[in-house]
Amino acid sequence: MNNLTKIKTGEKVTVIGLEKDSSVKKRLLEMGITPGVTLEVTGKAPLGDPIEVLVRGYKLTLRKDEAHAILV
């Protein structure tokens, strides 16, 4: 099981879950990142922060600590 920070640009993955103790878990769920949803990494900054993903038909930009909490 990986987290979203390890996925390369252009790859599609399915969310398995979110880290239990993450401080951003509620926020991610509110944005539509739930178990079973498909994410596509559409872009990354040179140092990996932020990460742009396509989720449920819209583009979302996540900070590295937020992306680290998403298990794929």
Image (cartoon, rainbow, N blue to C red):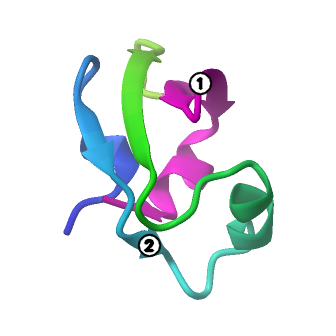
- Crowd around label 2: few <14 · some 14–19 · many ≥20 (10 Å): some
- Is 67 magenta? The answer is yes
Residue 40 shown left or right of residue 54 in the figure: left
Measured along the vertical axis of the image, is residue 44 above or below residue 21? above
For the residues labelled 1 and 2, the Cα–Cα distance comes to 20 Å
Measured along the vertical axis of the image, is residue 65 above or below residue 6? below
Q: Quadrant of the C terminus?
A: bottom left
- The amino acid on which the numbered mark 2 sits, given as a three-letter code, is Gly
- Is 3 magenta? The answer is no
Looking at the picture, how far across and down is residue 1, in whole percent?
A: 19, 69
* Magenta extent: 49-72
**Looking at the image, which residue sits at the far bottom?**
20
Residue 20's image quarter? Answer: bottom right
- The amino acid on which the numbered mark 1 sits, given as a three-letter code, is Gly
Q: Which residue is identified by label 2?
A: 17
Looking at the picture, how far across and down is residue 15, in whole percent?
A: 39, 59
User: Which of the two labelled residues, at mark 1 and mark 2, occupies the earlier sequence position?
Assistant: 2
In depth, the one of 6 and 59 nearer the eye is 59
Residue 48's image quarter? Answer: top left
Q: Which mark is residue 2?
A: none
Looking at the picture, how far across and down is residue 37, in whole percent?
A: 45, 52
- Crowd around label 1: few <14 · some 14–19 · many ≥20 (10 Å): few
Q: Which residue is identified by label 1?
A: 57
Looking at the picture, how far across and down is residue 59, in whole percent?
A: 62, 20
